[in-house]
Amino acid sequence: MRKTNMRLASLALAVMMMVSVFGTSVLAAPQITQPQYYNIDNPYADVNWSTSGQYKAANHTHSTFSDGSNFRRDMLLDKYAKNFDIVAMTDHDTTTIAWDSWTAAGSWNNNWNNIGLSDDVLLTAQELSAINAGTYNKTNPSPGTYNGNRTNTNGMISMGESNETSAEGERFNGGGSNFQNHHINAFFATSLPGDVGQDRNNSSDFGRTMDEVIKEVAARGGITHFNHPGRYTGGQNNAARSSDPAIVGKYVGLFIENPSCVGMEIINKWDGESINDRILWDNILTQTMPQGRAVWGFTNDDSHSLSGNGHAWNVMLMPTLSQAGARNSMETGAFYGVSRIDRKHSVNSVGTPGAPAQTTTTDTMYNGGSDNALALSFLAQSATPSISNIAVSGNTITIAGSGFSKVVWYSGTENDASKVIATGNFIDVSLYADAIANGYVRAELVGNTGVAYTQPFGITKATVSNATPAASVKKLSGNQNDLTITVTEQYSNGMSNVITTTIKINNNAAGTYEVGGYKVYVDTKGNDQIRACNIVK
């Protein structure tokens, strides 16, 4: 027994001598499972939630300058009364420049609804000035079906040049779809060829496809978003159309090709035509977000009457109310949507007296009808969900706000678009493979009186930006010590990870040791001194 122990001791001494003689050796440490960290591309990163204003924006509004049933003046007074802060007048193929002047003398729009040339159609210069300043007389603010009394102290301003354009002569038969006359909202751009004064239904005069319209607006310095895609995809009556690969691919191609096209409507009017457009949105995001291309979601009244005002709007987050700030929000995604009606969540779509049915008939689409007017008396004065803060830290997104009872997180998948992956006020994205695979998550804040919609957050794997080694020695009895090595990783998302391992070494040893996938060279000197410690490339 004694001879065996002596042989083992001699073998151990020989191994230690080899380490000492040959200097550097690689000693394997136990494998360590490293955590997964992710970069979260936060569209609200530049928003100072404690100081930024939240401005109610109408991106899609009509008057008798095209197919609306009320004068422009009355539509704007009604918007003002309902606490809108910024309004885009988007009459069809007619670029609005100012609220107190005609768009173009003798244009075909002046006779669309037989409005004539009466100045009652327009705001007066005095009214415009008071509305912009927020001092307009509030005692009789609106002729609308819901006579709101403005409580916002700031004024209401124009979005600037705006226009609902028609992309002509383009038929697409993916899944039976027809993109003929696809409507696209244009902002901050001068009139397009073929807008006013021409027959917009004669495609030979125009020859402008969806792609051509978007590029033409961009050439004029403007931006665009797609309107009510469900009308053209067939998704308004068939959810499967919103997942048709050919249909989805068409939009994906246009978004990838045209950075100036900032997004699409995900809510239109009372969520009739748009009922499945959130599914389409998720299918588009599933393909664009992994390519780093965000597509923003807009929620719009598309109001054609006074009773159509106040159902859906966008909350622009900007330091002060301005056209430049609104454009920046639309381009960067620093806004969220709000809708009083969401048919997917059954919010104000069933069981509410007077709630409009899902329909596309002319009367209820454009003029509202008695159902819509009645619904406004129940809905328009109710508080809706709002967001007071969105914070991103490491792998986690946290949302705070009011007026909602649950937060639902979505990330589309190839076979299950608009998939609910989590619920709650926060999400740790590292726990959800779907979000990581599809490159994004987004949230809907659901309450009894409406839904708020965030923009998508991009998700990519975080990378190690820096790794720093350190070592310490604990002297043991005899000629061995405990060497503890740590590697501190700094990740691109700001998180850090510390990997630690302890190895028994000889006195005054020098070696290369594996620590969580890193090879770390350590040279010890004397009792507990470290002569060198570095990662071996």
Image (cartoon, rainbow, N blue to C red):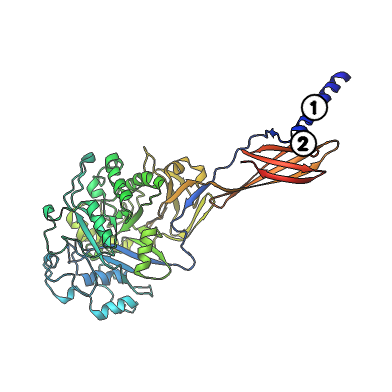
Q: Nearer the viewer, residue 294 or 401?
A: 294
Between label 2 and label 1, give the one nearer the viewer: 1
Q: Is residue 362 above or below residue 531?
A: below
Q: Nearer the viewer, residue 497 or 92?
A: 497
Measured in 3D between alpha carbons, the distance from the residue under mark 2 to the one under mark 1, in whole angstroms, is 14 Å
Location of residue 242 (image quadrant): top left
Question: As drawn, which residue projects farthest toward the right?
Answer: 2
Question: Of the numbered discs in the image, which one, if any, rests on residue 505?
Answer: 2
Q: Is residue 453 above or below residue 150?
A: above
The reply to whether residue 139 is in sight is no
Location of residue 197 (image quadrant): bottom left
What's the residue type where badge 1 is placed?
Ala
User: Looking at the image, how many numbered discs can be counted on the residues?
Assistant: 2
**Quadrant of the frame with the N terminus:** top right
Residue 342: give x, y in percent of width and height.
33, 52
Q: Secondary structure at mark 1?
A: helix
